[in-house]
Amino acid sequence: MEGKLMPRALPIFFFVLLSSTPLARSAHGQPIALGYSGSGISSDLRRVIEKERLWEKHGLNVRAVYFLSGGVLTRAMAAGDIALSDSDVPAMLGLGVSGLLDVKVIAVTINRLEHYLVVRKTIMKPEDLREKRVAVSGIGSASDITTRMVLRFWKLNPEKDLTILASGNTPTRIAALTVGHVDAGLVSPDHLEKVLATGCCRVLADLSELPMDYARFGIVVPTSLLRTRRETARNVLKAYVEGIHAFKRRPDIVMEIFKEEGIKDPQVAKGVYDRLSGSLRENPLPEVRGMQAALDSLPNPKARGVKAEDIMDTSLLDELKSSGFIDRLYGR
């Protein structure tokens, strides 16, 4: 089979024009646009931060802006429309690798793969994916990069052995899977039961069980922001670190968020909570092994010449750790 890459045309991203929106100013007089894509996992952590009003506690005014895929998100950062991202480390790394924008990863909140690869019931083993259609959110997005990496782990060639379709965001991808327009796709833990309840599909693999560290979710900023708005970046990290603490120690807040997202079954909610709470890192310090795995998974050949140390900056989290900020949260 010829390699078939069939991205569906994606709408140009919809961006909230901050200059025309009445926003309270941060301590430095500048609002902050935070871009994200996808739902669940990183979004759940951000919603905990919002519910606990941690942005305001740390002198910030953050406006979260949703993008349809990681590829669209990267274009927004390259254009200067967002100041940071918290949801798609691999896609954002592509900016630095390609030379479009000098970026740094300043935190990795989850350092492993968390999704499930869900398939139609007729697919029983990885080899059965040959000649099938696999959905990703967009070409170049984290779901695309992760899917290709996992396929190669199974000795499948994503360019030749199957068809990769850009089918849009998570709800669209799930809908395509349940009605049979595609045969496989990544599903986050908080959406898994909804898909399985349709009876269409089964879990082929829990990617968290793969033997690898992988910088999947975290905070990426233009390097220039660390020079011009360093205190702002520090306060963003304080809010995230405190948000992780609240996520781990206040399950009632997270369960409320799950209910709002449509997870009604208490047992299902507890299972998702336990998984995510265990994956979130008290000190979300970028680590070389997980960062290098993310770099090595990028399709751009230039990524092979990039060292993890060159595209991450641990200085702010090192400062928070040495100041005792993290230990005080946990009563140590």
Image (cartoon, rainbow, N blue to C red):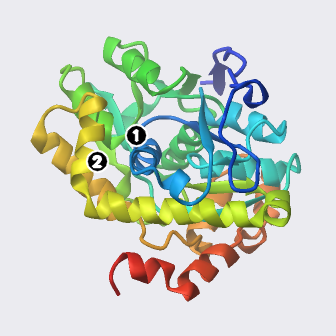
Disc nearer the start of the sequence (1/2): 1
Q: Residue at x 32, y 46 (%)?
A: 205
**Is residue 11 placed above or below 139 in the rendered structure?**
above
Q: Residue at x 25, y 51 (%)?
A: 273
Q: Amino acid at mark 1?
A: Gly
Secondary structure under tag 1 reads loop
Between residues 71 and 51, which one lies in front from this camera angle?
Answer: 51
**Is residue 273 placed above or below 116 in the rendered structure?**
below
Q: Residue at x 48, y 73 (%)?
A: 283
Q: Residue at x 59, y 46 (%)?
A: 88
Where does residue 24 sit, x and y in percent of width and height? 65, 40
Q: Amino acid at mark 2?
A: Val
Q: Quadrant of the C terminus?
A: bottom left
* Number of numbered callouts drawn: 2
Quadrant hosting residue 137: top right
Q: Mark on residue 254?
A: 2
Where does residue 101 sit, x and y in percent of width and height? 85, 49
Secondary structure under tag 2 reads helix
Q: Mark on residue 40?
A: 1
Q: Do we see residue 106 in this rendering?
A: yes
Q: Disc 1 to disc 2, how far (Cα)?
A: 11 Å
In front: mark 1 or mark 2?
A: 2
